[in-house]
Amino acid sequence: MSGHNKWSTIKRKKGANDAKRGKIFTKIIKEIIISAKEGGGDPDSNARLRLAIQNAKGANMPKDNIERAIKKAVGSDADNYVETSFEGYGPGGIAVFTECLTDNNNRTVASIRAAYNKHGGKLGTNGSLSSLFERKGVFSISKEGISQEEIELELIDAGAQDFEDDGETLTITCAKEDFGSVNRKLNDLGIEPDDAGLKRIPNTIKSLDIESARKVMKFIEVLEDDDDVQNVYHNLEITDELANEL
């Protein structure tokens, strides 16, 4: 299993506790708000909102929460979130790409910079990691009640490139251009992903000793716990030993 998907599995298990679930819900609500504000509150005509609602359902967010977020987004008192990103290197020279949604850019910049300074990282300029990460479609679906072999054949026809199985969840990766067709095929098959989106997948990964890797993961967790941060991507190799420690 790739480092990206091992870390996703770890985060999913950590997300089972109430404190983490609260943060996950906050991030999803912000995505719903900005999606509805930009493209309108009708998911039938707003693909980004439709995907955000799909992910909210995958995270078991109550329907009332979803409807309130959409209503707030199209109202006059909607929060003004803007999208921004940060690129840099964490401890051990690990490349880290951070995506944010914020209503106060000065606060976000100060917070991200403080995290880098405290943990021995170095912020770079936007575009400095463009060759290290590739945007790909990634879907996580529960294996319960599905015929994996049949589904994989159907999804390959729709453009799926890779499948990874962690025992409970099947992770499907495709080219960015095939995201829509794979998503539609899952819908045709009656499968609602637990999570779906365009993710930044590292083209190369870097291995570190356990102690250095621990420092990197602590830094990444600090970033992910920031309320303004939506996603954090990195190119650290998550070995089985490190995954067990985490």
Image (cartoon, grey):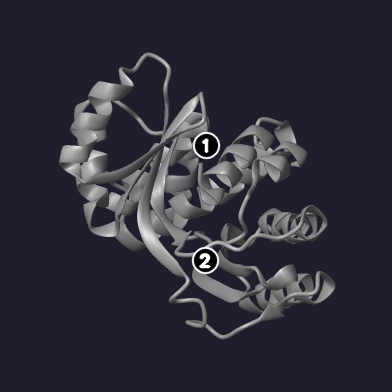
Tell me what residue is drawn at x 42 percent, y 46 percent. 70
Residue 76: which quarter of the image?
A: bottom left
Tell me what residue is drawn at x 51 percent, y 77 percent. 129
Look at the numbered discs 2 and 1 and tell me whether their residues touch, using CB distance below 8 Å.
no
Which residue matches tag 2? 81
Residue 171: which quarter of the image?
A: top left
The tag on residue 179 is none
Horizontal and vertical percent for residue 138? 39, 47
Is 53 placed left or right of 45 in the picture? Answer: right
Residue 107: which quarter of the image?
A: bottom right
Quadrant assignment for the C terminus: top right
Question: CA gap, disc 2 to disc 1?
Answer: 18 Å
Horizontal and vertical percent for residue 179? 27, 50
Q: Secondary structure at mark 2?
A: loop
Horizontal and vertical percent for residue 98? 58, 66
Is 70 placed left or right of 215 in the picture? Answer: left
Spot the residue most to the left: 157
The answer to which of 79 and 202 lies nearer the viewer is 202
Which residue matches tag 1? 65
Q: Is residue 144 above or below residue 139?
A: above
Badge 1 crowding class, 10 Å Cα cut-off, few under 14, some 14 to 19, many 20 or more, is: few
